[in-house]
Image (cartoon, rainbow, N blue to C red):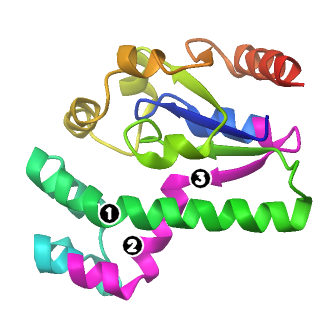
Amino acid sequence: MAIIGITGSIGSGKTSVAKLFSRHRYSRIDADEISHEILKSNKNVKKILMKNFGSEILGKNNEIGRKKLGDIVFSSDKKLKKLNLVMHLIIIQEIKNKIKKIRQECGSKAKIIIDAPLLLETSAKNLVDRVIVVKCSKKNILRINKKFSKHQIEKILNAQMPLNEKLKYADFVIDNSKDLNHLKKQVEKIIEELK
């Protein structure tokens, strides 16, 4: 098993789990980091997004303000679909490039973990051999997440595939309702099973 995909709702702890895997020699590819990089440095994407959503998406240094963009797209399904049409293909292509690079550097048996919130909603699911879904109660998501307001989290959760749907695709489920130690034990158990 070379490529594992990890997903879950916003703020469920996907990235913490992916980082635990990277301690076990898994190369981590983070779809959110790729997305941030594209928003920051891809002039073409910036042009398209400004055409679709206006200059109010710009923040300091004339860069796309992710929070401003988020406020706009999570207010309407239509706008979110528009953003996804622009971003998903580019993100997935970049994930493919990173997989290729890792395999060139580490060989075809390289262990890779892809941390992607929309793994199952996009064709990114075709890139992975196994799927891990991280589950976390809504109460904990709201408590843990400091990046977004409660209102924004609600909007994002409503826009994402419901957790019970995601669980249908899971080869492994990680329960992130306790502490880091509990998380580590579950990751180690999965790593053993994958050997």
Is the C-beta separation of discs 2 and 1 under 8 Å?
Answer: yes
* Residue tagged 1: 66
Q: Amino acid at mark 2?
A: Leu
Considering only order in the chain, which callout, 1 or 2, is on the residue closer to the N terminus?
2
Give the SS element for disc 3. Answer: strand
* Residue tagged 3: 30
Asked whether, in this view, residue 29 is left or right of residue 27, the answer is left
Determine if the magenta segment contains residue 179.
no
What residue range appears in magenta? 21-48
- Location of the C terminus by quadrant is top right
Give the SS element for disc 2. Answer: helix
Between the C-alphas of marks 1 and 3, the distance is: 17 Å
Give the SS element for disc 1. Answer: helix
Judging depth in this view, the residue of 134 and 122 nearest the camera is 122
Q: Which mark is residue 109?
A: none
At horizontal 41% and vertical 29% (from top left) the residue drawn is 9
- Location of the N terminus by quadrant is top right
* Residue tagged 2: 39
In the image, residue 95 above or below residue 149? below
At horizontal 82% and vertical 60% (from top left) the residue drawn is 103
